[in-house]
Image (cartoon, grey):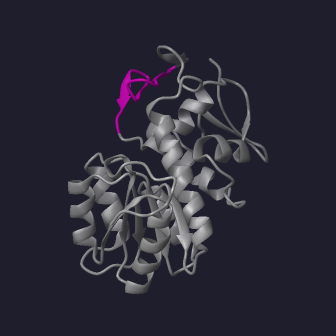
Amino acid sequence: MVSDNKNNTYEDEKKMILAVDDEEAIIDLLKFNIEKEGYKFISATNGDEGFELAMGERPDLIILDVMLPRMDGLSVCQKLRQEKNTVPVIMLSARSEEIDKILGLEIGADDYMTKPFSTRELIARIKANLRKNDKMAVDVDDVPEGRIVIGSLSLDPEKFEVVVRGRNVTDLTRREFEVLKYLAQKPGQVVSREDLLERVWGYEYFGDIRTVDVTVRRIREKIERNTSNPKILITKRGIGYYIAKP
């Protein structure tokens, strides 16, 4: 269906949003608001169908409920990442437990919202994640020429490649790579969690700085020999993080 929004581009130029939720009322709400913004909208009501659509249709962003029949949303997200599918994923959950959010972020979700949610806030997060994903592809200001080398850490922004102590790190998510790249551009300089949220996530994250901590922990698990005594990605207590100079 083509929306009448005056800002729409041609149909084949629109961003496509996939929503996976087993509540018909939620799907209808998302469809109305997302199409009103000029995006294409497709949907699925179970995890299996959602995964197949994600792999087959290649949407630009996925809104993924945690509690789904056949395959739960966390499993869908994890399976997508295992297939090297880096599409931005916003998780939705009716549960507010912190462990659910942390688990979602740890398996590669880009964002997390708890039901009931504000449609205005959701649309803002959709736009921010899409903008950030586009910037990851081409951004003259943020992508330096050539490889960044800081001690045992070597990072190539153009090839999406990280080498630590001669070992290729191949399992970083795009968000983890962006955090590491941003810090590597400022070796020895402490960057606050708030600054990382604004520059890497691309918008005010409603005060939820735990997202940064979870992402940093996952990066350390992949690049540090001893996560309890990191030598590359260092914490400045009460302030933020930095990449240690050699």
Q: Quadrant of the C terminus?
A: top right
- The residue at 34%/52% (across/down) is 11
Residue at point 49% right, 54% down? 110
Q: Percent from the top left, x then y, of residue 41?
A: 36, 64
Q: Is residue 219 above or below residue 68?
A: above
Q: Nearer the viewer, residue 219 or 114?
A: 114
Residue 131 at x, y percent in the picture: 52, 45
Q: Nearer the viewer, residue 160 or 169?
A: 160
Q: Which residues are magenta?
A: 152-170
Quadrant showing the N terminus: bottom left
Q: How far from the left and from the top, in percent, is residue 159? A: 38, 25
**Residue 158 among those drawn in magenta:** yes
Image point (51%, 81%), residue name: 94
Q: Nearer the viewer, residue 156 or 19?
A: 19
Name the residue rendered at 27%, 67% in the picture.
50
Query: With respect to residue 212, does 141 lie above or below?
Result: above
Q: Between residues 38 and 69, which one lies in front from this camera angle?
A: 38
Q: Position of residue 19 (x, y in %)?
A: 38, 68
